[in-house]
Amino acid sequence: MTSKAIAIACDHGGYDMKVELIADLQSMGLEVLDLGPDGRDSVDYPDYAYALADAIRSGKADRGILICGSGIGISIAANRYTEIRAALVHDALGARLCREHNDANVIVFGGRMTGIEVARDCLKIFLNTDFEGGRHARRVAKLSTPS
Ligand code: RB5
């Protein structure tokens, strides 16, 4: 489990899920850094992916949650930064493996694709699963140094 704040951001396709997940995180006693938006008005997902990436890169948070309609656009945006390993997750196995094998620091959901109960389950697994290291550490290190 992380000791720093957990950052969260979305676009209009992920707003309802964001509200639910913030309530869950707070009920777990975790500090939440909500990077917006504040409502369902149409916004551009890269702006929110970049805000969350900045929060992690600057050390304000060490884990993050991003949500757009499909989860795809906001993942692409976040993964433009080498410090960000954003994993678009649809089920519990993906939530576990993105931590064990990929040391993902951001979990991504499609607010129009994944039900809230599945997202809740995946988020708990994401927060409570450690990176396995070993052979995976070598591969993850290569993600930061594309040749
Ligand atoms: C917004 O309509 C939608 O395109 C966005 O939420 C996301 O699905 C993009 O990948």
Image (spheres, helix red, strand yellow):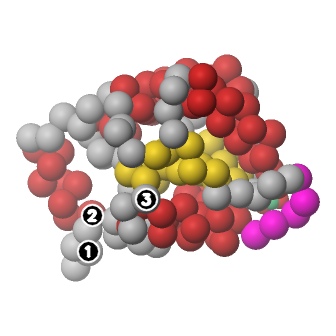
Q: Residue at x 27, y 64 (%)?
A: 143
Compared with 138, 136 (above or below) is above
Percent position of residue 4, x then y: 39, 45
Residue span colored magenta: 40-44
Say whether disc 1 or disc 3 marks the residue closer to the N-terminus: 3
Q: Amino acid at mark 1?
A: Pro
The numbered mark at residue 143 is 2
Q: Is 42 or 73 nearer to us in this picture? A: 42
Q: Secondary structure at mark 1?
A: loop
Q: Quadrant of the C terminus?
A: bottom left
Judged by depth in the image, the label closer to the viewer, 1 or 3, is 3
Distance from the alpha carbon under mark 1 to that under mark 3: 26 Å
Percent position of residue 5, x then y: 46, 46
Distance from the alpha carbon under mark 2 to that under mark 3: 22 Å
Q: 10 Å neighbourhood of mark 3: few (<14), some, or many (≥20)? A: some
Per the image, is 98 magenta?
Answer: no
Percent position of residue 24, x then y: 63, 26
Identify the residue position indicated by label 1 in the image.
146
The numbered mark at residue 71 is none
Q: Secondary structure at mark 3?
A: loop
Q: Is 19 or 87 nearer to us in this picture? A: 19
Say whether disc 2 or disc 3 marks the residue closer to the N-terminus: 3
Q: 10 Å neighbourhood of mark 2: few (<14), some, or many (≥20)? A: some
Identify the residue position indicated by label 3 in the image.
60
Task: Specify whether tag 3 is near ligand 1 (CB below 8 Å).
Answer: no
- Please state if 141 lies on the left or on the right of 89 as rendered: left
Q: Residue at x 23, y 55 (%)?
A: 140
**CB within 8 Å, label 1 to label 2:** yes
Q: Residue at x 34, y 65 (%)?
A: 83
Q: Amino acid at mark 3?
A: Lys
Q: Amino acid at mark 2?
A: Leu
